[in-house]
Image (cartoon, coloured by chain):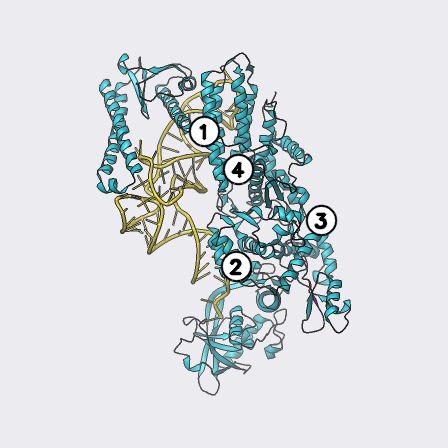
Chain colours: A cyan, B yellow
Amino acid sequence: MQVPPKYNHIDTEKKWYSFWMENNLFKSLPNEKEPFTIVIPPPNVTGLLHMGHMLNNTLQDILVRRARMLGKNACWVPGTDHASIATEAKVVENLKQKGINKSDISRDEFLKHAWDWTEKYGGGILEQLKKLGCSCDWDRTKFTLDDDMYESVIEAFEKLHDKDLIYRGFRMINWDPEAKTTVSDEEVNYIEEDSSLFYLKYLIENSNNELEIATTRPETIFGDTALCVNPKDERYKQFIGKYAIVPICGRKIPIIADSYVDLEFGTGCLKVTPAHDINDYNLGIKHNLDSIDIFNENATLNINGLHYEGKDRFVVRKEIEVELKSNNLLVRKENYIHNVGRSERTNSVVEPRLSKQWFLKMDDITKPAIENVLENENVKFFPSKFKSTYKYWLENIKDWNISRQLSWGHQIPVFYYGHDGDYIVAKNKTEALTKLNAKSKILYTEDDLNQDNDVLDTWFSSWLWPISVFDGIRNPDNKEINYYYPTQDLVTGPDIIFFWVARMIISGYEFRDEKPFSNVYFTGIVRDKLRRKMSKQLGNSPDAIKLIEEYGADSVRVGLMLSSAAGNDLLFDESLCQQGKNFTNKLWNASRLVNGWEIDVNKSQPKVNQLGLEWYNDKFNYTLELINKNFDNYRISDVLMSSYKLIWDDFCSWLLEIIKPDYGEKIDLKSKNELIILFEKNLKVLHPFMPFLTEEIFHNLPDVNVTSPLTTSSWPKLENYNQNTVDNFEITKEIISQIRNYRKEKNISFKTSLDLYYLPNKSSLKNIEIIQKIATINNLEESMKNNFAMVNSFLIKNFEFFIPLEEGFDKDAEIEKLKKELDYNERFLKSVQNKLKNKDFVNNAPDNIVDTEKQKIIDTDLKIKSLMKSINDLS
RNA sequence: GGGCGCUUAGCUCAGUUGGUUUAGAGCACCUCGUUUACACCGAGGGGGUCGGGGGUUCGAAUCCCUCAGCGCCCACCA
């Protein structure tokens, strides 16, 4: 068969991906086979493929493809996430450019824009995954805002609410006074900034005493509802329980004690403003304090700010300083550097603000997530170090704020009616009305109902993903969920261990009383060579699709997998893709070589071929065992590296050179057939990593039995192998290597035949024919040194080889060399002897260790004797 | 501030419950080679004493303590 000299990855990749798709090879339906399921971590619907996705999805594809070859019913469910904050921000920005302000249009109008945007830019990432070779069951593609997925989320909310796990409560949130919206914690940047620490005087009621406090925000005194000191603080004990007077407004506030207050900081006395500081808020709850909100939406002071009403917080800070000073209530002011939170979007200083939010109670429902990961390992983490991170989070878990003040997402299924925040939970208005009227004395109409404006946190849909993609929330007993759930592996980054992984485990046990997956493989972060995170701003992220086009998907996949142990960051550099490409080139050329060998049916199999093939078969199984083991432990980089060395070194550099017919000769049928079978096994092992190339070569090989694609072929079965064969060949390699060295040293061409002899030995020399062929040796037999006038000798294991010499022999140099080796061995012998002289060692160490040391003595002794003899002979 | 983790060849990393010679790999590097699969190649080679110090042990890269440096996550101290 004619195989083109250059591998064309562009055409080949297109050809095989279409073939796989047309033949539905990635399709999965429940059947009698064992399922192997992975749900994709859904990327943002409008996102584009970046290096992180490439790493993550290559890993998933490797796992899925191998499972498929292992005969499992492999099902990889693809999909995308609506990513409420990110997508909404993009849509708002886009509308702004068109001159449309989000607050000027209705919710429905905004959502229409958002859907237009999603349809225009959405789903591109899935097409890019196909280019990478991902073997997803594309018929199962899901989007978190699809009708069925939407309903699942709503139903989950209802179920949790029915169990009293969801409640409405107050919470301190980050308020962006410029954008007049809440921002999530992730969108706040804390930056060290210069500011001032003001020391203020608070008079004590009915006394001449006063308390001094320190604050960076004197304008918030209007919201003060207490002063707080540490109960251990001797200076202030007498004041606890008394009342202080807030400067300027003259309000009376209690003086309380709490260990939260740091004795060392400032004056050791704290003013408490529950409405405008998270810690003060917590103190307020604990001590049942009032909460006075002093700000308007735009962070100007409201009526509680008295004569400052309507003025901006920073203006007030300046003006109040003057007023306090004139009233002799400002003791002093010092420079102070502290962290100020600024909104990522507007850069305005974020104002902590109290607001009504929806929460999910976490303490009870997290219990199975703790037991089944940390105690039972029903869910395993790779690497396991992330268990401690997971543990720490779960043990300090707080209720989950699931509401977001956005429009793009799953609208909270809560309908308010009447006053006082009375509400009813329902899938839609009609159902809400029916439910409401069923329990109510008065008859309500749809106009009386108002749905909550907020949407649910994106993660509130993501955490259901492994269940909802199989419709297991709405139909908990359907065929699909019963078959595919729990899934097997999850591949994701450690950055979303809390956001996503932990919550999926929680929801799994909550909704199905079963884990969502058995194994979690954590990838690292893709960084550049300088360890910088890849980002758009830095421009250090290569264009993923360009890489695939330039190097080929297989090469990129190999490049990514070469140095990406679980949990380790991947320092990506294009040279990795080049290494991958070199490997594809190597494999391609190996196939060309083998394909080019013509068969002579009359020729019998030479001994050298038989030896080589026998060895490689054993070596293959030896490596396969390692590969399987490493797969089981998710050591994917190690799997690739052992395959890489198996193919490049053992198969190409050794076996093919052993089998290669002499110039003008043909190969015997038996050898060729056996070789093809081994080649095919190699391809199978590599297929998960390099699906396109291996599929192409598989069909190019002259095997008439190949009728089906490699993708759905079976993983090589591990056969028994002879460890001695593997070990002996290592000795053979060493011998050949020594001969090559010798040639190089003596400047003897590799084409010139040599005679090689070895001293009689109780164990027989293996692979003689191989040594002869590869090292171009004429005679290779036992002999005694004194049969020759002059020899050059070398030791390998227990064998001493020598090559007869005729001329050009530098005796002194040779003696020098041998003496060096002798010296080394003598010192080594001494160290082992010392070890064995140590009674503690001999008495305490296990027998096998001591025996090994004894064997070392015997071996080294032999070597030394032989070396001394050689030196003697030469002198 | 709290928590977790890391430090082994120039680079990226292995090193499984402490024990087979003088600690491994890939890449990079150096030398030689235009051999009829592959220069996207072949053959050969150099390079680390395992961050510093201390301890446990017959024996430590591996366990413990300590110091130093680095990274990540969480909180965000008036």
Q: Which residues are magenta?
A: A407-421
Amino acid type, residue under disc 1 in the picture:
Tyr
Mark closer to the observer (1, 4):
1
Task: For the residues labelled 3 and 4, say whether their Cβ atoms are less than 8 Å apart.
Answer: no
Residue A330 shows up from this direction: no
Under circle 3, the secondary element is helix
Q: Are marks 4 and 2 on the same chain?
A: yes
The answer to which of marks 4 and 2 sits earlier in the sequence is 2
Q: Is residue A411 magenta?
A: yes
Image coordinates of residue A146 in percent, x first then y, are 70, 51
Residue underneath mark 3? A119
Inter-mark Cα distance, 1 to 4: 31 Å
Whole-angstrom CA distance, mark 4 to mark 2, is: 41 Å
Dominant SS in magenta: loop
Task: Name the element at disc 2.
Answer: helix
**Where does label 1 land, which residue?**
A721
**Which circle marks residue A117 in the picture?**
none
Disc number placed over residue A559 in the picture, else none: 4
Output the chain of dot 2: A
Residue type at the position of mark 4: Gly
**Closer to the camera in the image, A326 or A171:** A171
Which of the pair A862/A17 is nearer the observer?
A862
- Reading the image, the residue beneath label 2 is A367
Tag 3, which chain?
A: A
Task: Give the class, few, some or many, for how many residues have Cα within 10 Å of label 1's Cα (few <14, many ≥20).
Answer: some
| Left or right side of A236 for A666 | right
**Rendered residue at 49%/60% (across/down):** A395
